Image (spheres, rainbow, N blue to C red):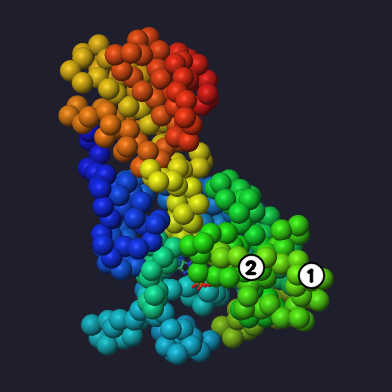
Amino acid sequence: MRFSTLFTKTRKDAPKDEIAKNAQLLIKAGFIHKEMAGVYSYLPLGKRVQEKIISIVREEMDKIGGQELVMTSLQKKEVWEITDRWDDEKVDVWFKAKLKNDTEVGFGWSHEEQITAMMKDYISSYRDLPANVYQFQTKLRNEVRAKSGVMRTREFVMKDLYSYSRSEEEHNEFYNKVIEAYHTIYKRLGIGDATFFTFASGGAFTQFSHEFQTLTEAGEDTIYLHRDKKIAINEEVLTDEVLSQLEIKREELEKVKAAEVGNIFSFGSNKCEQIGLYYSDKDGSQKPVVLGSYGIGITRVIGVIVELFSDEKGIVWPENISPYTVHLVSLAGEDENVKNRANEVYEQLTTKGIEVLFDDRADVPAGQKFSDADLIGIPHRIIVSTKTGEKVEYKARMGNESQLMSLDELISKFI
Ligand code: ATP
Ligand code: MG
C-alpha cells in the first residue's frame, strides 16, 4: 500500500473526550475513527488488524471442527421470551426497535437463543450431532459505561461459537478442545504469556464459567492470579469454598487487573430443553441437546494489545497481527535515483508476497515519516535514501540500531 494513496492521515491529537490509551493511539495512527462514545469505525489499517485476528481465530476454530456461518443482527422477540431474557431487567444491554407494523425486534447482543431456535430446523437425530457453529459478528450492547476505548464499546466484533452435543461427555470433550484452541489463539496473537484461564461466575449449568483474562492495568476486572499454576480466580467467585475446591491457598494469589478477552460457558441441556431442541437417539428415545457457548472479543483484543504493546512514540504491533509486515520509508526528496530505487524495493518485496506499507509521500519531511512509522507501529522498518545505495537500511520498531543490508538478505528475513 502506497501511503500517498491511503486516505487516512495520522493526527497529533485524539478527541478530548477520549481517555483510553488504546483508542487515543489507534485514532492518532489512523486505525479507527470515533463516531460517538463507545462507537468506533475501523479504517483500512484497523480493518487489516481485525482481519488478521479473525484469520487466526478462524483457523483454530476450523481445526477443532467449527463451521462458520453468520446470523442476523435483527432478532425476534418471541425467541427471547421463551427463556425469559427479553425483559430489560434481565438483560440490561438490549437495543430494541419496532418494525413499521409495530412488531418489536431486538438487536443481537448475543445469539444463543436465536441460533438454538434455528438449529431445530437442522438437528433431529443423533446423526446430526455434534454440531459446532461459529461466527464473527457485530454485537450491539447498550453498555452503561464506555470508558475503555475499544475494549468496551456499544458495537463490537465478537467470535461466538456454539456447540451442540449428544451428551455431557461429548460436550466436555469439545469444551476442553476449545480451551486448548483458545490458548493457541492468544499465543498466536502475541498475548499468550499475559493471558490466564480464569474461574468465574455465570455458569448457567456448571458452578463456573471460564474466562480468559489478559493482565493489564487498563482492564476492568480484578482477578486473583496463581502464577505457578497459570490459573486465576475472578474476584466475583473468590470464596474459601472455591479456594479449597481448587486446592489453592489465599496467600499464593496475586491481586491483579485484567481484561476479559474470552469467556466460555456450559449450558447443560437446560437451554435446549427450554427452546425445544431435542434429538432422537439410536434407541429411538428423545433427548435434549447439550449446549456450550464460547466467545472471544475480537475488537477488545485489539485494545488490549495496544495497551500492552505501545510506548511513548506509538503502537508496537506483534508480528502476526501487524497491518503490514514492513514499513518502507523513502527519503528520496527530489532525487530521481532514490525514488526509482524505493519503487524497485517496494515492487520486489510485494512480488515476494511481503506486505508493505510504502511511505512514498513526496512532500513530507523525514522526521514526520519516522514519527508516523513509530506511531503506526509496524515491527520492521526499511529506509531507502541517498545514503543506502544498492542496499537498504533496516531497523526494528523496538531496536535502537539500524543495519545496512542487501535486499536479498532482507527478503530472507521474512520468507
Ligand atoms: P464483560 O463482562 O466484559 O461485560 P461479558 O461477560 O458480558 O463481558 P460475553 O457475553 O461473555 O461478555 O462476550 C464474550 C466476549 O466479548 C467477552 O469475553 C469480551 O471479550 C467481549 N465483549 C463483551 N462485551 C464487550 C463490549 N461491550 N465491548 C467489546 N468487547 C466486549
Ligand atoms: Mg463474560
x then y, percent, for residue 383: 36, 23
Q: Amino acid at mark 2?
A: Lys
Confirm whether residue 355 shows in the render.
yes
Does 219 sit left or right of 365 as displayed? right
Q: Residue at x 27, y 87 (%)?
A: 102
x then y, percent, for residue 378: 42, 37
Is the CB–ligand 1 distance for label 2 below 8 Å? no
Depth check, front residue: 407 or 83:
407
For label 2, the crowd category at 10 Å Cα-Cα, with few meaning under 14, some 14 to 19 and many 20 or more, is some
Residue on which the image places disc 1? 248
Name above or below for residue 72 compared with residue 78.
above
Q: In terms of secondary structure, where does tag 2 sit?
A: strand
For label 1, the crowd category at 10 Å Cα-Cα, with few meaning under 14, some 14 to 19 and many 20 or more, is some
Does 236 sit left or right of 148 as displayed? right
Mark pair 1, 2: CA separation: 14 Å
Q: In terms of secondary structure, where does tag 1 sit?
A: loop
Residue on which the image places disc 2? 255
Q: Residue at x 45, y 90 (%)?
A: 89
Name above or below for residue 184 compared with residue 294.
above
> Is the C-beta separation of discs 1 and 2 under 8 Å?
no
Q: Amino acid at mark 1?
A: Ile
Q: Residue at x 53, y 23 (%)?
A: 413
Count of numbered labels shown in the rendering: 2
Depth check, front residue: 174 or 224:
224
Snapshot quadrant of residue 372: top left
Name above or below for residue 166 compared with residue 193.
below
Q: Residue at x 34, y 81 (%)?
A: 96
Mark with earlier residue (1, 2): 1
Residue situated furthest top in the rendering: 390
Snapshot quadrant of residue 213: bottom right
Confirm whether residue 130 shows in the render.
no
